[in-house]
């Protein structure tokens, strides 16, 4: 009786350890990181934590914007958006039967163009006398697809080129 009871206790213990055992999830988990370069000479005086800027879209956490004579001065100069070479590409579409014979051939025309913007950001620190300047660039490609004729593709681009350029100019400026 004692042997059966001890055997039963051992089986229960082994089963319990198997049931309660923890398992490690070794799947790879990815997470986004970002880094900040801290200044070598930080501005710790609260009265000097001010900035001026030529752009309303520049905000600096922990600093307050003043009209003039800020400790930090940001100058944003947008140089505009340039239009690259405009190309109208001809695409051939063939309808085939089960044997591979061409039943019908049609063509579509796509307008392809590139847009490039540049800007300069200058930062001046009146407290330490440091000055920095950065050049920023943004590039995008535009593609209008599926026009039935070359002239329709060309007319579409000519009628809409300024609104397309303005769209990319605003996108690039906001991104910068």
Image: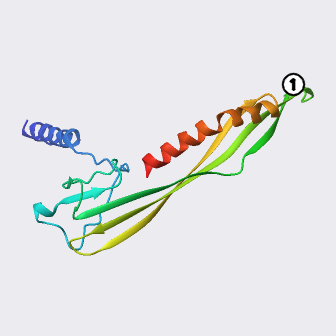
Q: Residue at x 38, y 65 (%)?
A: 122
Image: 173 above or below 69: above
Give residue 124's position: percent from left, percent from top: 30, 68
Q: Residue at x 22, y 38 (%)?
A: 19
Q: How many marks?
A: 1
Q: Secondary structure at mark 1?
A: loop
Q: Is residue 44 left or right of 54 when viewed as pictured?
A: left
Give residue 22's position: percent from left, percent from top: 23, 45
Give residue 174's position: percent from left, percent from top: 43, 46
Q: Residue at x 43, y 52 (%)?
A: 176
Q: Specify few, some or many for label 1: CA neighbours under 10 Å numbering under 14, 14-19, or 20 or more.
A: few
Q: Return the residue at label 1.
A: 98
Q: Is residue 73 left or right of 170 when viewed as pictured?
A: left
Which image quadrant is residue 7 in? top left
Give residue 121's position: percent from left, percent from top: 40, 61
Which quadrant of the figure contains the N terminus? top left
Image: 69 above or below 146: below
Q: Residue at x 67, y 52 (%)?
A: 84
Image: 45 above or below 138: below
């Amino acid at each position: 009786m004692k042997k059966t009871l001890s055997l039963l206790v051992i089986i229960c213990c082994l089963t319990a350890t198997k049931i309660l055992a923890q398992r490690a999830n070794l799947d790879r988990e990815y997470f986004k990181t970002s880094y900040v370069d801290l200044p070598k000479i930080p501005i710790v005086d609260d009265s000097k934590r001010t900035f001026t800027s030529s752009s309303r879209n520049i905000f600096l956490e922990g600093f307050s914007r003043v009209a003039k004579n800020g400790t930090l001065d940001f100058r944003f100069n947008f140089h505009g958006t340039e239009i690259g070479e405009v190309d109208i590409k001809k695409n051939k579409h063939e309808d085939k039967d089960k044997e591979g014979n061409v039943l019908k051939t049609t063509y579509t025309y796509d307008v392809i163009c590139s847009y490039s913007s540049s800007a300069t950001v200058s930062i001046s620190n009146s407290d330490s006398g440091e000055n920095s300047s950065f050049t920023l660039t943004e590039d995008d490609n535009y593609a209008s697809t599926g026009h039935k004729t070359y002239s329709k593709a060309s007319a579409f681009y000519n009628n809409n080129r300024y609104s397309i350029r303005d769209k990319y100019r605003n996108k690039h400026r906001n991104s910068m």
